[in-house]
Amino acid sequence: MTTSVRVNTTTYATTHVAANMIRSLKQIIRASGLDLVHLVDQWEVLEAGVTTWLQSKHLTGLVLEVFDPRERSATSLVGRFDFTIDYDYGADSDGDLWLDPDMIDYVVRKNGVYPAQCRYTFIASTKPGRPAVPGWDGTQFRSTDHLTRRTAGTAITGGVIGAALSYYTRTSK
């Protein structure tokens, strides 16, 4: 007699990655000197969108844009943090679930603190055909032409799902 056991870890993996991306955004926002009120107000909507689109494999990235609301030009974006999703990250892994909070701290230290007037917004990058999630509307990314992108590496994994973190800083002249 042969016995086999198969455990579907997709729900655990997507919940882990979604929760830790949002937790990491909270860590970035707090350590960057930004006001947490907007995140708290958006928490349920953010969690619903990220979890739904991770489960459906439509989410390709989650972005935190930091901007100066006094600026009306293309340079209003003062910083950006991108989580890029890889659905084949740990194809040969044993289903590890982990988070690297030291990487988040490192990225914030490298990026610095933002001026008090700065605000932020969340943008989900998704594949066409994504399921509708209340509270999420289409939007445009602000220009990053005046910023330099830096890749920190994989910050979160959940089974076969990985979330790499990149950040943008002012370009040196």
Image (tube, grey):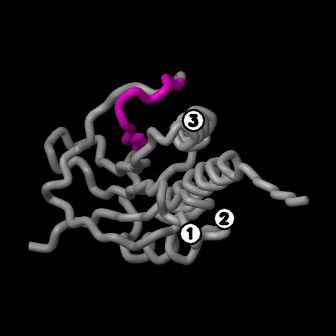
Mark in front: 1 vs 3 = 1
Residue bearing the label numbered 3 = 52
Quarter of the image containing the N terminus?
Answer: bottom right
Q: Which type of secondary structure does the marked residue at label 1 adopt?
A: loop
Residue bearing the label numbered 1 = 92
Marks 1 and 3 sit apart, C-alpha to C-alpha, by: 24 Å
* Residue 95: mark in rendering: 2
Q: Measuring 41% from the left and 40% from the top, which residue is drawn there?
A: 124
Pick the residue in front: 164 or 74.
Answer: 164
Q: Name the amino acid type tagged 3.
A: Thr
Mark in front: 1 vs 2 = 1
Q: Where residue 116 sits in the image (x, y, percent)?
A: 40, 54
Q: Where residue 133 sits in the image (x, y, percent)?
A: 52, 25
Q: Name the amino acid type tagged 1.
A: Asp
Mark 2 surroundings within 10 Å by alpha-carbon count, few (fewer than 14), some (14 through 19), many (20 or more): some
Q: Which type of secondary structure does the marked residue at label 3 adopt?
A: helix
Q: Which residues are magenta?
A: 121-133
Residue 23 visible in this rendered orientation of the protein: yes
- Along the horizontal axis of the image, is 103 left or right of 12? left
Mark in front: 3 vs 2 = 2
**Up-down: is 10 above or below 31?**
above
Pick the residue in front: 85 or 115.
Answer: 85
Q: Where residue 166 sits in the image (x, y, percent)?
A: 36, 64
Q: Measuring 60% from the left and 34% from the top, which residue is drawn there?
A: 48
Pick the residue in front: 25 or 50.
Answer: 50
Q: Where residue 41 sits in the image (x, y, percent)?
A: 59, 35
In the rendered image, the residue lying farthest to the right is 1
Q: Quadrant of residue 157?
A: bottom right
